[in-house]
Image: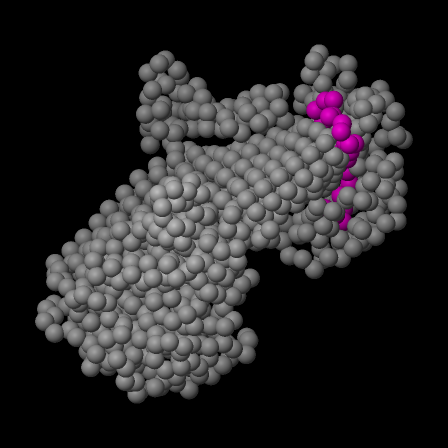
Amino acid sequence: MTEITQHYLDQFNAASAGLAGRGLPWLDDQRQAAIELFARSGFPGQYEEDWRYTPLKPVIGKLLHIKVDNDIADTDISDYLVAGLDAYRLVFVDGRFSPQYSDTSGLQDCIVMNSFEQSVARNPELFTETMRSEVPLSNGFAALNVAFSTDGYVIEVAENVKLDKPVEIIFIAVNSDLATQPRNIVHMGKFSQAVIIERYVSSKQTGAVVNSTSRISLDEGARLGYYLVQTQANDASQISSVDVNQGKSSWFGCYTLTLGGQLVRNNLRVSLQAEGAHCDMLGLYNTGGKQHVDNHTTVVHAAPHCTSRELYKGVLDQRSRGVFHGRIKVEQGAQKTDASQSNNNLLLSPNAEVDTKPQLEIYADDVKCAHGATIGQIDQNSLFYLRSRGIDEKDARALLTFAFLNEVLDEIELEPLKQSMESILAERLIADE
Amino acid sequence: MSNSEKDLAPLLQRDYTEGFVTDIDSETLPPGLDEDVIRTISEKKNEPEWMLQWRLGAFKRWLKMAPPRWAHLHHPPVDFQDISYYSAPKKRDLLDSLDEVDPKLLETYEKLGIPIDEQKMLAGVKVAVDAVFDSVSVATTFKQTLLDAGVIFCPISEALQAYPELVKQYLGSVVPSADNFYAALNSAVFSDGSFVYIPKGVRCPMELSTYFRINEMNTGQFERTLIVAEEDSYVSYLEGCTAPMRDENQLHAAVVELVAMKGAQIKYSTVQNWYPGDENGKGGIYNFVTKRGACRGQGAKISWTQVETGSAITWKYPSVVLEGDDTIGEFYSVALTNNYQQADTGTKMIHVGKNSRSTIISKGISAGKGQNAYRGLVKVLKGAENARNYSQCDSLLMGDQCGAHTFPYMEVKNPSAVVEHEATTSRIGEDQLFYCRQRGMSEEDAVSMIVNGFCKEVFKELPMEFAVEAQKLLGISLEGSVG
């Protein structure tokens, strides 16, 4: 056991009595199992196949400063809002639920939306069997999150309920060098519908680290649009683990939009567990400076007649590095699977780097699976075309880069979010030169 | 599943016609591996001192290494002390002509259809053959004709005697002695293999070929092949392999090194048909091979073509390091797994030089309970301006018990590089079959035709005679396996 692992074990022993929901047997068990797993596995290292392109040392070092702090810092949240977005809102400042900034007025009774901490403290009966069930912990980070998590959001949408407005959750990092571990749980009842926007932002230069997990389950016929929007400052880091279980004929649309962060690693795992489930996974990353964005996705086709579609597009500038790992796993018996996966990258600078691993693992024969990956630069002919029509090179490049990303942007159904992304990108691309 | 699958199931069970054993007196070292075994092998080959030291160095490094576990393969651990590292048919001194080769050996190769009798060569089709039987080379044909052209083609043990400087210069220069676990093992105990040297400006007058045969029980075969093509030369080299049917697993851990200088071209083709084990997955060869080529000078070209139908387990990644500017690397592969066979194979293309180009075409076919994985790396280093890669990996699945996997890696550090990867997985379409059946073809002919069409891009890269053999091999292996 390394010194670091020991440090966390000591911390767990010291802090466990004060952690949210102490005394709830299912939660205590989860935390215990998680810390034991962490004691065994520790943090992943670059010698591990799934982490080989991502240096974790800086993040692990910073994670050491886990602070349990009850003061909610004052902040002006208007800086972090998306213009024109009308949504129910939960706001977390430095990892703690902040009721004064949140707005859930007008929410139907059949929808429960609260912070994890308050829920486990006040009405633990809220957690259904599905929400309580064992969390699959894919790595040391997720284990640490479950062991130490204090807050996060919990959403339960009852059967046949359709949310009238999207739900926006904002995690704001304000204080410097703070590590937070939000734990989020979503359960969509049969034939329910919702849109969730999970946003991570930070005020400039906090060096904050977020180690988040989101556990999402969809019952039969449920539909969930899920946006993970990362626009934190360029010195913040995040490790996120999103784990999704889909029931019969459900739809899950996942949009991972990463524009900020120094080191961002997104683990996304979707399991299609009953017939007719479909998922769309879209990703967009645009990086500069020394940013490092690593998207690690897995789709498991565990039942027949499921479909999945995945498209990740990235533009990398300056000394930034983009990593993509996509795996489609088709289990035995998952016949009539239709899965596609594609990762396209544009390299704008001689010092940028892309490492991509699109993978197929197939154990059934009557399936249609295709994947593709490309790494390239702006097409010289297109550039010439634009220049010959009087557009200067800088604008032409920005235009073409924007067009490249637009394939993903176009799929964003929330108009205000789309516009906000477009304006951030437009500003960056013009300034890049 | 259609009824036709059941009817045709027996056709999937093909016989392994090369599975006989040659009864011949041989000299075999007892199983086990330590420094003494290495010293004995080196002594038997009358090797220079530096060679022995090189082997011992590799052995020391090997002791500290662990077998790779990252591949998508499952097999019980290999007991490296249970293998005999040297086995040779008992024979007299160096052979001057084929007349002195043990008739039993000639018979063996005749049975396998390998022409080691120069007179029996087909008119017009000239192939020089080096026949390797267990640990040693037993015959090499057309040596003299080749020497007249300046081409050296001989067993590597002989090259160590006759051209030690050449061997010393290049051996281990592409695959270092401790490159990986199996390469280190091979470097320590390799017994024979072929050495080819093509001087500047020479186009090798005929195809060169090595035929590998494992015969003895409990032995491993560790051959080492080294091909050096000097400036502006050309050579096409073929490799074939078979082994008897046995219940135990045998190990084959070879190393192949290719060096192509400025403007040189090496074309390396393999038809690998080691014993794949029976339909219950018992026996078969573990084929753990390291193959790598280096394009050292400007405009050099290395092309790997492989048809992998045999072996219980295949672990093999023929690679090209594109060091020079304007160099070309190619990889064409058909890998077939049936019954319980497993394959984890692919390639590595390392782009170092400017304008270097590489093409990867990989076709995987899985039937029965076979598991077939493509694993490949395309790496573009910072200085590789305008590097270009195109990869295509297609898998064909036959039956619902098999698996097909694709694990490509792409690492690009240069913005002017263009790297593309495409992969699809499918089975033979009912409509394709229907179309053929409707025109009066039997189901098995239709399948065979569709599979051959699937592999055509690779087969067309093989030399003529090999292409025919490969098609036949695939045909027998797959008749009737319609999913």
Residue A7 at x, y percent in the picture? 49, 81
Relative to B434, does residue A392 appear above or below in the rendering? Answer: below
Q: Residue shown at 76%/27% (left/top)?
A: B202
**Relative side of A382 to B119, left or right:** left
Which is nearer the eye, A166 or B339? A166
Q: Is residue A124 left or right of residue A205?
A: left
Q: Nearer the viewer, residue A245 or B11?
A: A245
Q: Give above or below for B263 relative to A48.
A: above
Q: Nearer the viewer, residue A205 or B272?
A: A205
Q: Position of residue B211 (x, y in %)?
A: 70, 29
Residue at (46%, 53%) from the top-left corner? A347
Q: Is residue B41 left or right of residue A351?
A: right
- Magenta segment, which residues? B185-208
Q: Position of residue A243 (x, y in %)?
A: 33, 61
The C terminus of chain A, quarter of image = bottom left
* The quadrant where residue B327 appears: top right
Q: Say if residue A200 shows up in the picture.
A: yes
Residue A153 as seen in the image, left or right of residue B158:
left
Q: Is residue B217 magenta?
A: no
Residue at image location 76% in from the left, 57% down from the top: B60
For the N terminus of chain A, the image quarter is: bottom right
